[in-house]
């Protein structure tokens, strides 16, 4: 039992409309941050969310609050996609990932993560963003563990080339799911998914050519970005 309830103090649950408004704000802000970066106009975010400015500021009094929550929102959703893909690949209950399911699960996760606009996160992690936030670290670790398991399963089965690591996947995902700068690209999502699938096909073993440098691990990315 919650201590506040034990003490006779009820913690009010947020109203359903408030929860919906908050999610609408986060979804609209995510799209605006993809297009214009973390300094996207807050008034336009409110308009796209279909709410008034006062509602946006009631949920997020400061821009930094909104940026912080959008990053966590995207990270949580991408981590959930990774966990769902992993669960689907081990659906027979023995905890072992079937070799052929592993590559399909990896592809499914990659495309789902692109739809969450994960490519917009890197620019937002700059500046004074709190990269040591416990929620962020938990989402990052859950995501990393699931991606590494999916990748390792394909490598053990000989379906995924062994000269790449999870960091390579996340770098490519971030780059290929980010809009091209300076232009309005019609139907950009369809191009992103085409190019992601080309990249995923390039992960299949055996590799057709050697890769320069060494595999990028998730730890390499954390040292540079988080």
Image (cartoon, rainbow, N blue to C red):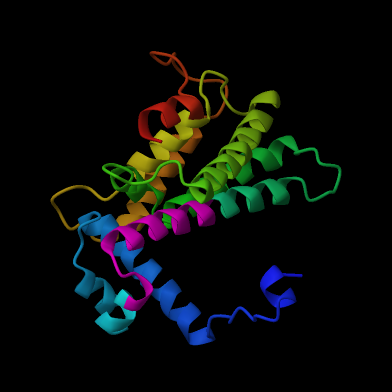
The residue drawn where x is 32% and y is 65% is 29
Residue 118 percent across, percent down from the top left: 40, 49
Residue 87 percent across, percent down from the top left: 72, 50
Left or right, 131 with respect to 14, comes to left
Tally of numbered discs = 0
Above or below — where is 127 with respect to 165? below
Residue situated furthest right in the rendering: 94
Depth order, front residue of 141/11: 11
Query: Residue 141 lies in magenta, yes or no?
Result: no
Identify the main secondary structure in magenta.
Answer: helix
Residue 205 percent across, percent down from the top left: 57, 24
Q: Which residues are magenta?
A: 58-78
Q: Which quadrant is the C terminus positioned in?
A: top left
Query: Residue 66 lies in magenta, yes or no?
Result: yes
Q: Quadrant of residue 116?
A: bottom left
Residue 160 percent across, percent down from the top left: 59, 27
Left or right, 105 with respect to 209, comes to right
The residue drawn where x is 83% and y is 49% is 92
Depth order, front residue of 111/71: 71
Depth order, front residue of 63/167: 63
Above or below — where is 116 with respect to 28? above
Q: Quadrant of residue 171?
A: top left
Q: Is residue 43 visible?
A: yes
Q: Quadrant of residue 185?
A: bottom left
The residue drawn where x is 28% and y is 82% is 54
């Amino acid at each position: 039992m919650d201590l506040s309830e034990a003490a006779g103090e009820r913690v009010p649950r947020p109203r359903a409309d408030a929860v919906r408004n908050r999610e609408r704000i986060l979804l609209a802000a995510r799209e605006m941050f993809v297009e214009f970066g973390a300094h996207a106009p807050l008034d336009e975010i409110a308009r796209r969310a279909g709410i008034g400015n006062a509602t946006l500021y009631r949920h997020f009094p400061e821009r930094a609050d909104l940026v912080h929550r959008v990053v966590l929102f995207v990270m949580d959703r991408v981590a959930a996609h990774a966990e769902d893909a992993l669960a689907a690949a081990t659906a027979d209950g023995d905890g072992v990932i079937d070799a052929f399911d592993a590559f399909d699960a990896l592809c499914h996760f990659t495309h789902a993560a692109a739809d969450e606009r994960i490519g917009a996160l890197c620019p937002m992690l700059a500046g004074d963003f709190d990269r040591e936030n416990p929620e962020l670290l938990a989402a990052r670790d859950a995501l990393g563990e699931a991606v590494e398991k999916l990748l390792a399963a394909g490598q053990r089965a000989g379906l995924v080339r062994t000269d790449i690591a999870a960091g390579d996947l996340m770098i490519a995902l971030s780059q290929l799911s980010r809009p091209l700068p300076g232009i309005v690209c019609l139907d950009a999502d369809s191009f992103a998914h085409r190019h992601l699938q080309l990249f995923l096909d390039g992960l299949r073993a055996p590799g057709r050519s050697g890769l320069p440098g060494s595999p990028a691990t998730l730890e390499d990315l954390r040292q540079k970005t988080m």
